[in-house]
Image (cartoon, grey):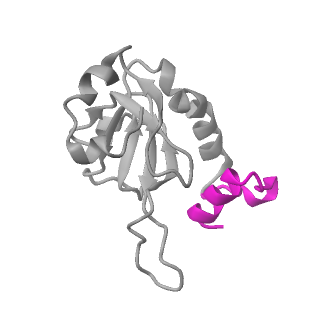
């Protein structure tokens, strides 16, 4: 099962236990599970960052990461245009790995995530503020956004 198929099965809630085969060994899976809850708890994270993967690492294949000093979630644009090997640029990168190393081991200049906006499939604009690093920051910073970015937000 590819990373894309796995992700889509998780989203559609059709994943079965027998489809979850470790890529390497069970110890790797247990290490990832041990940090998963902490990595996905964005609202209670003291400092969560994002960055492009630009450091050479062994056995890791992803384009960008979110995380902190305890671990990262790696993302990759592996969604191909059907019946081709070309990456579909209209699709966002999907999570492909979870590692318990600091984000600075993969990204030289990670940036703080200040807020996260949310929208549902089929909606053209972001209409929910999921997270902000400091209460009221989004309202203040929104005024500094470009017109193009503002046109994508209806909060």
Residue 25 position, x and y percent, is: 64, 52
* Quadrant where the image shows the C terminus: top left
In this rendering, the answer to whether 116 lies above or below 89 is: above
* Quadrant where the image shows the N terminus: bottom right
State the residue in front, 142 or 80: 142
Residue at horizontal 49%, vertical 27%?
42
State the residue in front, 45 or 136: 136
Question: Could you say which quadrant of the image residue 114 lies in?
Answer: top left
Residue at horizontal 35%, vertical 15%?
136
Residue 107 position, x and y percent, is: 27, 43
Q: Is residue 133 magenta?
A: no
Residue 99 position, x and y percent, is: 48, 42
Left or right: residue 55 compared with residue 46: left
Residue at horizontal 49%, vertical 22%?
43
Q: Where does the magenta region start and end?
A: 1-23
Residue 122 position, x and y percent, is: 55, 55
Left or right: residue 147 compared with residue 88: left
Question: Could you say which quadrant of the image residue 133 lies in?
Answer: top left
In this rendering, the answer to whether 89 lies above or below 85 is: above
Q: Is residue 14 magenta?
A: yes
State the residue in front, 134 or 140: 140
Number of numbered labels in the structure image: 0
Instruction: Give the farthest residue toward the top.
Output: 135
In this rendering, the answer to whether 69 lies above or below 83 is: above
């Amino acid at each position: 099962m590819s990373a894309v198929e796995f992700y889509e099965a998780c989203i559609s809630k059709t994943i079965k236990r027998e489809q979850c085969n470790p890529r390497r060994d069970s110890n790797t899976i247990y290490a990832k599970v041990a940090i998963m809850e902490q990595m996905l708890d964005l609202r209670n994270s003291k400092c969560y960052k994002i960055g492009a993967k630009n450091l050479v690492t062994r056995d890791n294949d992803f384009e960008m990461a979110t995380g902190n000093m305890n671990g990262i979630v790696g993302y990759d644009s592996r969604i191909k245009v059907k019946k081709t090997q070309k990456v579909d640029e209209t699709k966002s990168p999907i999570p492909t790995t979870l590692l318990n190393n600091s984000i600075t081991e993969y990204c030289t200049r990670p940036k703080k995530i200040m807020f996260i906006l949310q929208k549902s499939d089929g909606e053209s604009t972001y209409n929910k503020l999921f997270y902000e690093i400091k209460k009221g920051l989004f309202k203040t910073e929104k005024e500094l956004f470009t017109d193009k970015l503002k046109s994508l937000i209806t909060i």
